[in-house]
Amino acid sequence: MSSTYPVRKKHLVLAIGMAAFLTGSLAVAAPAPWQDRSASTQDRVAALMQRMTKAEKLSLVTSELAMEFGNYKKPAGAIGSAAYVAAIGRLGVPALQISDAGLGVTNPVNARPGDGATALPAGQAQSGAFDLQLAREGGAMIGAEAKHRGFNVLLAGGMDLVRDPRNGRNFEYMGEDPILAGQIAAAEVAGVQSQHVISTIKHYAVNSYETGRMMSSMDMSVPAMQESDLLAFRIAVEEGKPGSIMCSYNKVNAVYACQNPYLLTDVLRGEWGYDGFVMSDWGALSDGAAAVTAGLDQDSASTLDRGPKFIDAMRKMANRPEGEKVLDTKVRHILTAMIANGVFDDQARPAEGDAEIAAHMAVARRIEEEGAVLLRNENATLPLASVKKILVVGGHADKGVIAGGGSSAVLPRGGSAVIDPVQPSLETMPHPIVFEPNPPLDALRKAMPGAKIVFNSGENPREVAELAQKADAVVVFVTKWQGESLDAPDLELTEADNALIEAVAQANRKSVVVLETGNPVVMPWFGKVGAVLEAWYPGSAGGEAIANLLSGKVAPSGRLTTTWPKALTDLPRPELPGAGHHAGAFPFDKSNIAYLKNYDLNIEGANVGYRWFAERKIAPAFPFGFGLSYTQFSHDGLTVSMSGKTAVAHAKVTNTGKRVGDDIVQIYAHAPDGTPLRLAGYGRVTLAPGESRIVDVPLSPYATARYDVAQKNWKQSAGTYRFVFAQNAADQTGPSASLSIDAE
Ligand code: BGC
């Protein structure tokens, strides 16, 4: 990090003051009971709360916006980010410095001038890598960069299920499958929290659309919701133990998620036993008093709220004897997350220099290498290893790789490679369009020093066609930008991009299309090009990763975690009124009234994505789990056995091709009750040519269970299940095995 890193003087004074407080107390006496690391979290929290005044407790249940815009000035002590809660110096309670970090540590409206960070690739690549260890490393990378900047709470872990490929935020999410999304999010959370930084999962719950997001209701029956979106969150809570959960903007069954007692109290506390804290999304509260009783613990960036204020309701409540207990419960949730995650014991403080950039970029690169999906590769068009003259076209491939827009957008180190003329502000969300300065063109030249590689911007298809005729191969880069607060009206690329690809395909048989999109797209030219690589939004090291994949240094192995439909008419909701209309940032945008609509999610219910396509017998353009490699694999056998209480699949894979590559083992459960298939387990295996291995894949107990409404819990559903070792969700012809499950 540059020496101009904006450490605020006041913040330093605060940090020094706190250090003095801590060392002072250590020098003269034993540590206060809540500072005793050998005591349990519960005891430490209780001891601290005994010493806190009501005013101190109240100071923890709201956070303040920590960036400047318009007349709003960020609070003294805030580093500059999404939100801030002041320290309680008297008791050594650290300030909460809260930053967005879905893909990397953000720097909204350049609140910390020039402070760029490492961005991971989009959630589709993170989940598409099917690699829990790597997801954890991604989280640890973000956690380390956050801690280094003085942040101790991250708004990481976007994990709403992808119910519709038009949602502008899908690039922040982990795909359409609840078990995979929950486990990947859990791994990322565990990685962040390994750095003693609290992680948040969001947006709880069912924030399926951006269109009308601050007003619309997502309507769904309890069992369907439990077996889809809530299942993903449940798994993330159980396996990742996030210190915090962010409730969403939308209503769920007519009640705002942040004011929803069913979600915040009955399910989260009652059914899942969650002991961390719930924070609201920024400006999500329309009735703070309702949020108090529903179970919200911390009102985020309270200045953005509309309607009766949460803090006023809290103060009023805390003045009544039984009301103070409500305040205590909220404070206990916040302090539990802080103490359990080491926020007291290993305090984050802004440090000089940038932490381990090379190692962090390597994590981002590996996720992209494992998560990008090869959709087509006719006549071994890829890899380009032996090609001598390559034309690279379009997509600003000479400058960088594109990121998605909105609160998750990470400021690249060195600034954006392409300048978006729209001035960034909260009102112009999801701008700016950001390009990481990591051009695939430079990286390709480095990866293929023997090849002559030229670039053309792609504005003139005729000129491109002429150049393409003279090249041995052509790589066309196509970007489609999407972001928070906007859904796309369709899955189309621009006419200009389609025309450019057609022109290239006609001029050169060795044509490669690299897509940098946030969602599936329609490809009218698909049958005419040689190869298609979906790189998603490929993150800070995207250029290098794409070059490694194209040149063949690395064989593609990523798989789709969202079903690609052939047409919008194949989706549960073909029409999406208002899509493309800005959903409003903060505060409440009245122009959205025109698009106020409720979404009937019972149409597909728990049959999200591939389960919908299976139930309706619709063939997708590309199924969930699809992805090619430069080598081939055979799937030769499957057995399933019980190991203690866990079912484990043993799947035999052989690399039948000529080069090393990774296969993704996918095991789907077919239930005796006839409900559509579910991904039950998965694994990644690296195999040399000719090598065989039996891969042991633990199967999720949720794949053989149903939600029991009367008992408010999941129960194993008895019967004989068929497990299939499949290529993808739509091809279930692979080896299979049966297992009988007893009722619980
Ligand atoms: C987004 C959240 C984000 C928050 C703070 C909201 O607009 O929905 O995902 O964490 O802003 O930036």
Image (spheres, rainbow, N blue to C red):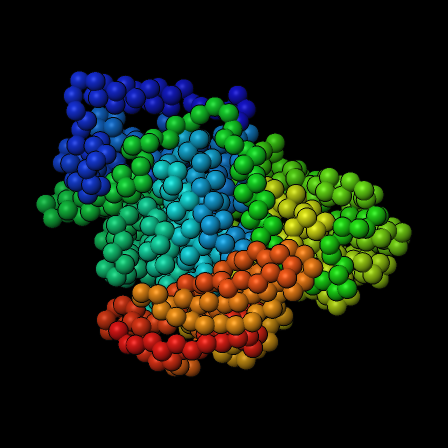
Query: At 25% from the left edge and 68% from the top edge, which residue is drawn?
Result: 712
Q: How many marks?
A: 0
Query: At 61% from the left edge and 54% from the top edge, which residue is drawn?
Result: 372
Give the answer, above or below, for where 26 lies relative to 264.
Answer: above
> Is residue 189 visible from the viewing direction of this image?
yes
Q: In the image, residue 336 lies at what x, y percent?
A: 25, 43
Give the answer, above or below, for where 651 lies relative to 486.
Answer: below
Left-right relation of 80 to 448: left
Q: In the image, residue 15 lies at what x, y percent?
A: 34, 23
Query: At 34% from the left edge and 72% from the top edge, which residue is drawn?
Result: 705
> Is residue 375 visible from the viewing direction of this image?
no
Q: In the image, residue 31 lies at what x, y percent?
A: 19, 26
Residue 154 placement: quadrant: top left
Residue 100 placement: quadrant: top left
Query: At 80% from the left edge and 58% from the top edge, which residue is drawn?
Result: 510
- Name the quadrant of the C terminus: bottom left
Left-right relation of 477 to 430: right
What is the residue that sits farthest to the left in this orientation?
321
Residue 225 placement: quadrant: bottom left
The foreground one among 198 and 78 is 198
Q: In the image, residue 544 lies at what x, y percent?
A: 66, 43
